[in-house]
Amino acid sequence: MSTLAHAQSAAPAAAAPAPDWTVTGNLSLASDYRFRGISQTNKQPAISGGFDVAHSSGFYIGNWNSNIDSDFFQGANIEMDFYGGYKGTLADFGYDLGAIYYYYPGSGRAGQTKVKNTELYVGGSYGPVSAKFYYPLSDFFNAEQIFPGGGNAGGSYYIDLSGAYDLGSGFGVNAHVGFQKLKGSAKVTEIGKTAIENDIIDWKIGFTYGFSNGFVAAVSYIDTNRSLAGVTRNISNGTGVVSLSKTF
């Protein structure tokens, strides 16, 4: 065999080109489902999951679902989120533009008001830090119909500031602070108080550990600056949340 032929036969095979489309799924079991710092399950466990379809151009769509407490959502016991958008980078900065629709099948039964919400969002990231701004397209979660008299809740925007850092050896740390501006009937009254509040601040600090089989365990402390009543308890005070999840 000639030297040239031997070199050609020993050359590694060319890597297969990356596919234009990728599909991933996710599944999680958690001790509580917190949305912007507030429990959606009355501090009971939640099982959630969904899928994402992404194109190499940056376009993506997805779905995420979780159980919820039906007393909070006009009879619905499932939340289904549908979203889509476009992600890209400019130099070292990442950006994310899209919309999300929150759907609660079963809400509105027996004359109750149907719960729904649609928000536009725009986000940016630099290294381990990210920020995202959410703005509703109409009455925020139909608050005016559910709690009449307070006015339309449109314009109740939310700001999310988050960061995550890889500590190595499978360990990671993450933190978050959020600001929810409330308008109209979406404004809240705290437990034992009469003053109407027009904002909620929430925050989180958490740690994660990734196992070699792809599962990720997480423990977080979540709290807000408000005390809000659930069915039987305060659903916005500080609490620890543990979870086990996997993306596949």
Image (cartoon, helix red, strand yellow):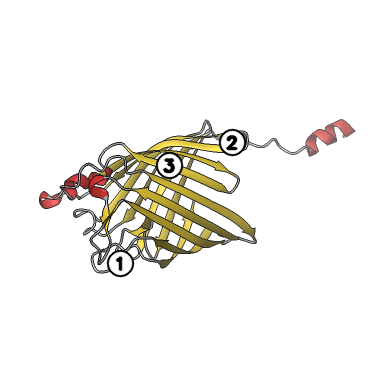
Residue 170 percent location from the top left of the image: 61, 60
Q: CA distance from mark 1 to mark 3?
A: 27 Å
Which is more N-terminal, label 2 or label 3?
2
Residue 28 percent location from the top left of the image: 42, 58
How crowded pointer 1 is (Cα within 10 Å; few <14, some 14-19, many 20+) is rated as some
Q: Nearer the viewer, residue 72 or 12?
A: 72
Q: Residue at x 47, y 45 (%)?
A: 24
Q: Say which amino acid is labelled 3.
A: Phe
Name above or below for residue 36 compared with residue 53: below
How crowded pointer 3 is (Cα within 10 Å; few <14, some 14-19, many 20+) is rated as some
Kindly tell me whether residue 28 is visible in this rendering.
yes
Q: Nearer the viewer, residue 213 or 72?
A: 72
The reply to whether discs 1 and 2 touch (Cβ–Cβ < 8 Å) is no
Q: Nearer the viewer, residue 178 or 76?
A: 178
Q: Nearer the viewer, residue 232 or 32?
A: 232
Q: Residue at x 46, y 62 (%)?
A: 244
Res. 67 image quadrant: bottom left
Residue assigned mark 2: 18
The reply to whether discs 1 and 3 touch (Cβ–Cβ < 8 Å) is no
Res. 156 image quadrant: top left
Q: CA distance from mark 3 to mark 2?
A: 31 Å
Which is more N-terminal, label 3 or label 1?
3
181 left or right of 221? Answer: left
Residue assigned mark 1: 234
SS state under label 3 = strand
Which is more N-terminal, label 2 or label 1?
2
Q: Say which amino acid is labelled 1.
A: Asn
Q: CA distance from mark 1 to mark 2?
A: 48 Å
Residue assigned mark 3: 133
